[in-house]
Image (cartoon, helix red, strand yellow):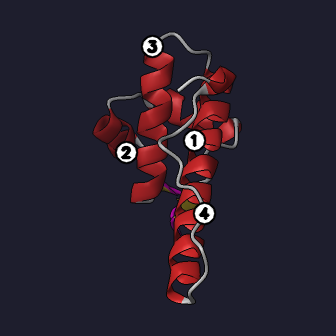
Amino acid sequence: MGRAAEMIGATPGFLRAIGEARLIAPLRSEGGHRRYSRYQLRIAARARELVDGGTPIEAACRIVILEDQLEEALRLNEELRKAGAEAGESPGPRPEGRARAGGHN
């Protein structure tokens, strides 16, 4: 845990806190040590950025979850557009970018 925290510029306590908030759930080694994936470290680093900017940890975790869900939805939409275009269907309008909270771009 200490090495993972060091890699993202956080403390082990921060990693424990986002684990308790269910943002990440590291695997455990046979010796009981937490093992973080690169994806989990990327998510944790994003949460740390938000917390460093003054966002409460619970809100930061929710924001990171929503950002991740949005990224996945956009990826799936693009895959469906490509599959539809290959099948000869009209691809429909393309979004110009990500919408921000409050509906402003």
Q: CA distance from mark 3 to mark 1?
A: 17 Å
Up/down of 52 relative to 65, above or below: above
For marks 4 and 3 on the same chain, the one whose residue lies earlier in the sequence? 3
- Residue 4 place in picture, x, y as percent: 37, 45
Q: Which residue is mark 1?
A: 67
Q: Nearer the viewer, residue 64 or 98?
A: 98
Q: CA distance from mark 1 to mark 2?
A: 22 Å
Q: Which residue is mark 4?
A: 92
SS at circle 4: loop
User: At 57% from the left edge and 89% from the top edge, which residue is drawn?
Assistant: 87
Which stretch is magenta? 29-34
Marks 4 & 3, CB-CB < 8 Å contact: no
Amino acid under disc 2: Ala
Q: Which residue is mark 2?
A: 4
For marks 1 and 4 on the same chain, the one whose residue lies earlier in the sequence? 1
Which of the two marks, 4 or 3, is nearer to us in this view? 4
Q: Nearer the viewer, residue 30 or 34?
A: 34
Up/down of 83 relative to 27, above or below: below
Q: Circle 3: is it few (<14), some (14-19), or many (20+) Cα within 10 Å?
A: few
Q: CA distance from mark 1 to mark 4?
A: 24 Å
Amino acid under disc 3: Gly
SS at circle 2: helix
For marks 3 and 2 on the same chain, the one whose residue lies earlier in the sequence? 2
The total number of labels drawn is 4
- Residue 102 place in picture, x, y as percent: 67, 21
Which of the two marks, 3 or 2, is nearer to us in this view? 3
Which of the two marks, 1 or 2, is nearer to us in this view? 1
Up/down of 97 relative to 81, above or below: above
Q: Circle 4: is it few (<14), some (14-19), or many (20+) Cα within 10 Å?
A: few
